[in-house]
């Protein structure tokens, strides 16, 4: 955040001052959690379904905040944002904040205006914004890009998957005068969402990873998803760079939708940054030859799963465009770490049992990738896939779950544990594909899954846990890791 007075913030967001002459300067962090505020920070009072941030306004200022951004008057120096006009309240923002009158959406809109101002000012002094979107892999790729750019200069990126109307401006406001690179993950649950995020923090480099089935229930088709994801390359300036995955035809087709220069990545022969001679080790970690116009170099990714190759190529393309050498990029890719929790998080118990905790979220593409990694990592060992619902698939839900169950059989996964009736088609698909008996089982909830695993797991087994976030299957992974000797 750059230093601003409350009066300046009021002018930027179109709000009015309350309980202050506006002279207080915001020099600390911008937070919606009062416990995270630093001295001189700005507290964002978000109304919510269970907790209303306005009730914490006075406490936040007493703890050192310079002021509050609020939807109504509070007992503290504040900028009061105006209500949104009819029809302007972003439905997605209202869902995020949990309010019913649009006041939370109004605060988020003001937060976006503040972030847009700060990013615009920092862009004048050399800040480069990198945006990343795709149906899967956004968080992992964002983490890789940040790790490749950090040696080039101060870099800001969101923790985890903080990629919506709240997380996007919050992350942008972490940037200050010293920041050279701002890496932002951009999600969409409907048309126009990515375009709006791009207006808050205009990217000069945009990365599109893939077009899958995530949220197909909301977009209607993969083509509808592609139209929304394509809002990122459309937002790039003429001197910008669009990094597009040529292995995905719908992404490759976005080249015609951007004014920016296109850099293709992938295993496709036309890719400017591509992987050749790809092999996986016994832990499903990929080694490949990174081939670019500047030459080639060997990479050995320490991350589990072949799907990380495409993510790494996109990250490499961004770093190379921003001045990193090929040798440095290859070396850094070979030394990256997993920064976000519950994404192919591999942990070994004392008795040798291995847990692949990929429980943060799930869609058909990411589940297929995780199952392939499980099959590779469990050669000679008994494998378990503990899978739950893949949400927001609309009319394709039953067929998509059925296909995942069948894939588990084709990959020779030893045991399939399907959690919850919403995912029952996985169990049915596995049973039909392989005429399985006890190899596949449907359990009602996470407690039942934990009980089954407690009884049947053995040392040296390999267990994948994956589902959409709402299923909270990380409880299963945590319980398995808490046990030893076959007891979870």
Image (cartoon, rainbow, N blue to C red):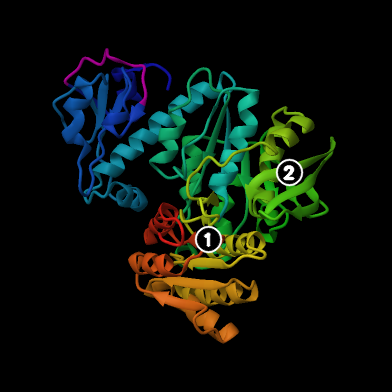
51 relative to 395 in the view: left or right? left
The residue closer to the viewer here, 85 or 474, is: 474
- As drawn, the label of residue 459 is 1
- Identify the residue at horizontal 45%, vertical 72% (top origin): 418
Eyeballing the image, is 400 above or below 109?
below
Q: Position of residue 64 (x, y in %)?
A: 25, 18
In the rendered structure, does residue 23 fall within the stretch colored magenta?
yes
In the rendered structure, does residue 386 fall within the stretch colored magenta?
no
Q: Is residue 159 visible from the viewing direction of this image?
A: yes
Eyeballing the image, is 20 above or below 149?
above
The quarter of the picture where residue 268 lies is bottom right
Dominant SS of magenta comes to loop
For the record, the magenta segment spans: 19-29
Q: Is residue 236 visible from the viewing direction of this image?
A: no
43 relative to 118 in the view: left or right? left
The residue closer to the viewer here, 347 or 269, is: 347
Q: Position of residue 320 (x, y in %)?
A: 73, 33
The quarter of the picture where residue 460 lies is bottom right
- As drawn, the label of residue 300 is 2
SS category of the residue bearing label 1:
loop
SS category of the residue bearing label 2:
strand
């Amino acid at each position: 955040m750059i230093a601003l007075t409350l009066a300046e913030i009021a002018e930027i967001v179109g709000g009015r001052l309350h309980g202050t002459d506006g002279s207080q300067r915001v020099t600390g962090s911008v937070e919606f959690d009062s416990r995270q505020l630093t001295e001189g920070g700005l507290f964002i009072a978000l109304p919510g379904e269970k907790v209303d941030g306005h009730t914490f306004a006075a406490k936040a200022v007493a703890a050192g905040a310079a002021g509050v951004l609020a939807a109504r008057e509070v007992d503290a120096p504040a900028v009061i944002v105006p209500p949104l006009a009819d029809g302007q309240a972003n439905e997605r923002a209202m869902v995020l904040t949990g309010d019913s009158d649009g006041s939370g959406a109004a605060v988020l809109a003001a937060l976006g205006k503040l972030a847009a101002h700060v990013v615009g000012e920092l862009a004048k002094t050399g800040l480069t914004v990198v945006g990343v979107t795709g149906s899967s892999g956004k968080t992992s790729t964002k983490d890789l890009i940040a790790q490749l750019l950090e040696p080039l200069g101060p870099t800001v990126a969101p923790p985890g998957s903080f990629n919506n109307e709240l997380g996007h401006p919050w992350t942008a406001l972490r940037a200050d005068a010293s920041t050279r690179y701002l890496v932002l993950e951009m999600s969409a649950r409907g048309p126009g969402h990515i375009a709006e995020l791009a207006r808050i923090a205009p990217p000069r480099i945009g990365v599109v990873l893939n077009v899958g089935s995530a949220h197909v229930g909301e977009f209607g088709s993969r083509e509808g998803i592609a139209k929304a994801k394509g809002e990122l390359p459309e937002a790039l300036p003429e001197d910008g760079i669009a990094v597009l995955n040529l292995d995905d035809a719908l992404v490759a087709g976005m080249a015609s939708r951007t004014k920016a220069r296109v850099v293709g990545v992938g295993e496709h022969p036309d890719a400017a940054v591509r992987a050749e001679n790809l092999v996986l080790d016994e832990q499903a970690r990929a080694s490949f030859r990174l081939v670019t116009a500047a030459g080639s170099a060997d990479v050995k990714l320490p991350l589990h799963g072949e799907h990380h190759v495409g993510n790494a190529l996109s990250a490499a393309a961004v770093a190379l465009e921003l001045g990193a050498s090929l040798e440095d990029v290859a070396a850094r890719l070979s030394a990256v770490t997993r920064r976000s929790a519950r994404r192919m998080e591999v942990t070994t118990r004392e008795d040798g049992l291995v847990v692949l905790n990929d429980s943060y979220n799930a869609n058909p593409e990411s589940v297929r990738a995780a199952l392939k990694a499980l099959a590779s990592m469990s050669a000679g060992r008994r494998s378990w896939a503990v899978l739950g619902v893949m949400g927001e698939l609309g009319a394709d839900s039953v067929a998509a779950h059925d296909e995942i169950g069948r894939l588990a059989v084709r990959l020779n996964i030893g045991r399939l544990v399907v959690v919850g009736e919403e995912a029952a088609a996985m169990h049915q698909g596995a049973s039909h594909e392989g005429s399985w008996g006890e190899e596949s089982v449907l359990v009602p909830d996470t407690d039942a899954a934990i009980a089954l695993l407690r009884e049947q797991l053995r040392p040296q087994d390999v267990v994948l846990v994956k589902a959409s976030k709402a299923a909270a299957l990380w409880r299963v992974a945590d319980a398995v890791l808490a046990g030893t000797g076959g007891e979870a």
